Image (spheres, rainbow, N blue to C red):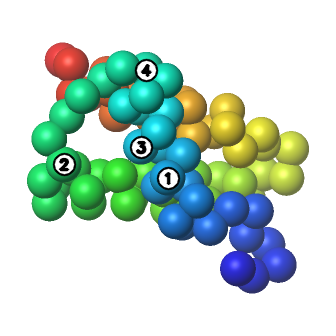
Amino acid sequence: MSRKERISREEAVSFLLTHIVVERGHTFEMNQLNLFHITNMATEAQQVLAREEEAIPHEVMEDIARRFIERETS
């Protein structure tokens, strides 16, 4: 992890999956497309956290997860 990275992509993927499935109770099929989306969301979280020092990691990832859930349920 570089100096500017506040969270690794693996940590972000783990947090996102736990938050979506366990904390929010949202189920979805873990196929290649959704794995791609989750990986992209983790990368987005990394970029936001690297760019915005004041950003709180779990809040950034919860917001990203919320958008994923909304897209899945619409």
Q: Residue at x 58, y 59 (%)?
A: 11
Reading the chain from its start, which is encountered first: label 2 or label 3?
Answer: 3
Above or below residue 52? Residue 69 is above
Reading the chain from its start, which is encountered first: label 1 or label 2?
Answer: 1
The image's mark for residue 66 is none
Amino acid at dot 2: Met
Query: Which image quarter holds the C terminus?
Result: top left
The image's mark for residue 17 is 3
Instruction: Say what secondary structure mark 4 lies in.
Output: loop
Amino acid at dot 3: Leu
- Cα–Cα gap, marks 2 and 4: 16 Å
Residue at which label 2 appears: 30
Q: Is residue 29 left or right of residue 52?
A: left
Query: Residue 29, position in %: x, y?
Result: 14, 41
Q: Are marks 3 and 1 in contact (CB under 8 Å)?
A: yes
Residue 6 lies in what quarter of the image?
bottom right
The residue carrying pointer 3 sits among few (fewer than 14), some (14 to 19) or many (20 or more) residues within 10 Å by Cα, namely some
Q: Residue at x 49, y 24 (%)?
A: 23
Task: Out of 9 and 45, give the one closest to the viewer.
Answer: 9
